[in-house]
Image (spheres, rainbow, N blue to C red):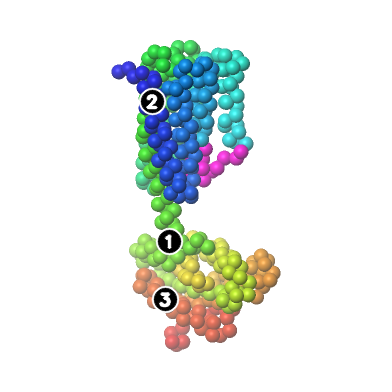
Amino acid sequence: MQVHDLTLMLSLFFASITGAIVLSAITRMSQTIEGTRYWAIALGILSIAYLSQLSMQGMPRYVMVITFNTCLILGHAFWLIGAWHFVHKPPSKQKIFLLIVPILALSLVFTLLIPDRSLRLLGIGVWLLLVRANYAWVLWQHAKHDRNEYIAVTITVSVVLLELILSFFYTLYGAFGALPSIGERFSWVGGYTWVVALIGIVAGVPLLMLLSVGRFVRKLEYAAHHDELTDLLNRRGLSKCLDSIMPLSQRKCRSLSVIMLDVDHFKYINDEFGHKTGDQILAHVGKKLKSSVRASDLVTRWGGEEFCIVLFDTSPAHAMQLAEKVRAAFSESLEQLNPTLNNVTLSAGIANTETVSKAAFEATQLQADKALYQAKNNGRDRSEMYLIEDV
């Protein structure tokens, strides 16, 4: 089946402009989805490239060639830049310069100064092969965080590999002068290369949507289970973690300890130094807690200036040592950070149980809270262990 090149250009134009509009809408939905904005720009620029083949047939040949090649290069460059941003590896300005400027210069040289279509097609073709291969490699290496993302990336990479195979023959034919200009006559290499490019956009846009929306949903889920200020688990996040790890912990752990910590005189700090300083102190507590515990321990901002640490297989003595270590590290580092806050301290309450279950955690947390209350009553800036005889 033969398909006229200009018909393919029209199809590519509509597919590209539709994809650009859809991805722009997703970008407006959430500015935090890295890469989507660049993919929308890429498709918008590519739509101009394909439109130029339809609307500039009556213009001087070099004008149409420069417009098409420039937009094709910029479009695929932004597509790759979007992938770099999506996997949280944004390129430097120097890297972007090296990606775009040399190939644009080469394209202009072999169009205006040394008009040679074969060399121009060879240069741009090799560049496109490298860029598309890099795009597939970046996604394959870094964008497989869950099953849906893995499926989307696998399909995307498969389509890109098909593009690369046909683009290789397209470049080879172009380098030896065996490739007719777009719109002249049908060439199976040129025609099917553009067909695969169309498939890449028609299939690629929904896949990019799936990647972007999946990333957005994960960000929402993360935000729902974490405290924005300290980046610690919130109470909902702690509950979810306990639900998922308790079955394993019940088989492998013999005890559970809970430490409740509270910033002393926090209301006074907010009133005296302002809420911004109060937030800095809370963020600093979160940082110190994360750096002080094991990977298996759970750290939570319980609410306000209160924090909770859940320790598995830890004796009461070790829990007390950790509480004292955290309190000392916090006071020392905070004084170095801001000498005017040298009197800010933490109080801690500790409780332990040999029953490992969510119900046992809830009971132990209440006991640790009572021990924290006892620490407050005993003068603050101290750690207290919950004892049954204290009740």
Provide the residue designation for mark 2. 10
Q: Amino acid at mark 3?
A: Thr
* Region of the chain picked out in magenta, as a range: 80-93
Q: Which mark is residue 343?
A: none
Residue topped by disc 1: 225
> Viewed as shown, does residue 67 lie left or right of 246?
right
Callout 3 secondary element: helix
The residue sitting at 51% across, 16% down in the picture is: 61
**Closer to the camera in the image, 216 or 288:** 216
Could you tell me which secondary element the residue under label 1 belongs to? helix
The first of marks 3 and 1 along the sequence is 1
The nearer-to-camera label among 2 and 3 is 2
Q: Amino acid at mark 1?
A: His
Residue 22 screen position, x and y as percent: 40, 40
Foreground residue among 207 and 379: 207
Instruction: Give the secondary structure at mark 2.
Output: helix
Tell me the CA gap for discs 3 and 1: 22 Å
**How far apart, in angstroms, are the residues tagged by discs 2 and 3?**
68 Å
Q: Nearer the viewer, mark 3 or mark 1?
A: 1
Identity of the residue drawn at 43% across and 87% down: 391
Q: Residue at x 42, y 78 (%)?
A: 366
* Comparing labels 1 and 2, the label whose residue is closer to the camera: 2
Judge whether 272 appears above or below 4 on screen: below
Residue receiving disc 3: 364
Image location of residue 387, percent across then percent down: 46, 83
Q: Between disc 2 and disc 3, whose residue precedes? A: 2
Rendering coords of residue 79 (x, y %) = 48, 35
Residue 243 is situated, as x and y percent measured from the top left of the image, at 36, 64
